[in-house]
Image (cartoon, rainbow, N blue to C red):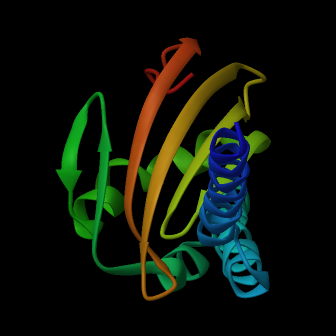
């Protein structure tokens, strides 16, 4: 009987220590929180650049080798992104970010976008970072006006 109790105590202690060790390894420290906040600021600057039609600001936050993907684009270069996607900035009034989650060098965003014509589009985007800049953006078009549209 004493052996059973002793074994149970050891097992309980082992479970408690294992749980604490696992928790310590997965908890984000203050440095991770600060890095995530910086990346959140960069992503918000991405949307602000579209709203303000400010290519210079956009270019500052995109990494060398940047690629953009969507249902109509497959890992296009920065040059093609500027040619194909940037003209849409002149059709965008604003973005309302609903959800923004940063985890290390990755981020996920869900937003509502409003065109200058008052139409709503809803997308989600998955970002990857390198050296504090956006290296990749994968955009998934949601329901609404099937943006990008025919210029309306």
Residue 93 lies in quadrant: top right
Q: Is residue 126 above or below residue 148?
A: below
Left of 20 or right of it: where is 134? Answer: left
Q: Does 128 sit left or right of 44 as displayed?
A: left
Q: Residue at x 43, y 39 (%)?
A: 139
Residue 103 location, quadrant: bottom right
- Which of the two residues, 74 or 50, is positioned nearer the viewer here? 74
The residue lying toward the viewer, choosing from 85 and 132, is: 132
Evaluate whether residue 53 shows in this view.
no
Q: Residue at x 63, y 24 (%)?
A: 122
**Would you place residue 58 above or below residue 26 in this image?**
below
Report the quarter where the N terminus lies. Answer: top right
Q: Which quadrant of the rendered structure holds the C terminus?
A: top right
Image location of residue 12, percent across then percent down: 71, 48
Extreme-top residue of the structure: 144
Residue at the far front in the pictured view: 1
Q: Is residue 94 left or right of residue 131?
A: right
State how many labels appear: 0
**Residue at image location 68% in from the left, 63% down from the top:** 17
Q: Position of residue 15 (x, y in %)?
A: 65, 51
Out of 65 and 108, give the one closest to the viewer: 108
State the image coordinates of residue 151 (x, y, percent, origin top left).
49, 27
Q: Position of residue 41 (x, y in %)?
A: 74, 72
In this rendering, the answer to whether 129 lies above or below 35 is above
Residue 6 visible in the shown view: yes
Q: Residue at x 72, y 87 (%)?
A: 31
């Amino acid at each position: 009987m004493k052996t059973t109790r002793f074994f149970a105590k050891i097992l309980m202690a082992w479970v408690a220590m294992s749980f604490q060790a696992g928790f310590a390894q997965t908890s984000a420290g203050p440095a991770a929180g600060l890095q995530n906040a910086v990346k959140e600021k960069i992503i918000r600057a991405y949307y602000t650049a579209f709203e303000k039609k400010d290519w210079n600001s956009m270019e500052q936050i995109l990494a060398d080798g940047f690629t953009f993907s969507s249902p109509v684009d497959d890992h296009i270069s920065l040059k093609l992104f500027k040619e194909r996607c940037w003209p849409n900035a002149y059709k965008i009034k604003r973005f309302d970010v609903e959800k923004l989650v940063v985890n290390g060098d990755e981020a996920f965003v869900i937003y509502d976008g409003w065109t200058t014509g008052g139409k709503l589009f809803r997308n989600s985007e998955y970002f990857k970072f390198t050296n504090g800049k956006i290296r990749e953006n994968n955009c998934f078009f949601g329901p609404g006006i099937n943006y990008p549209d025919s210029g309306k």
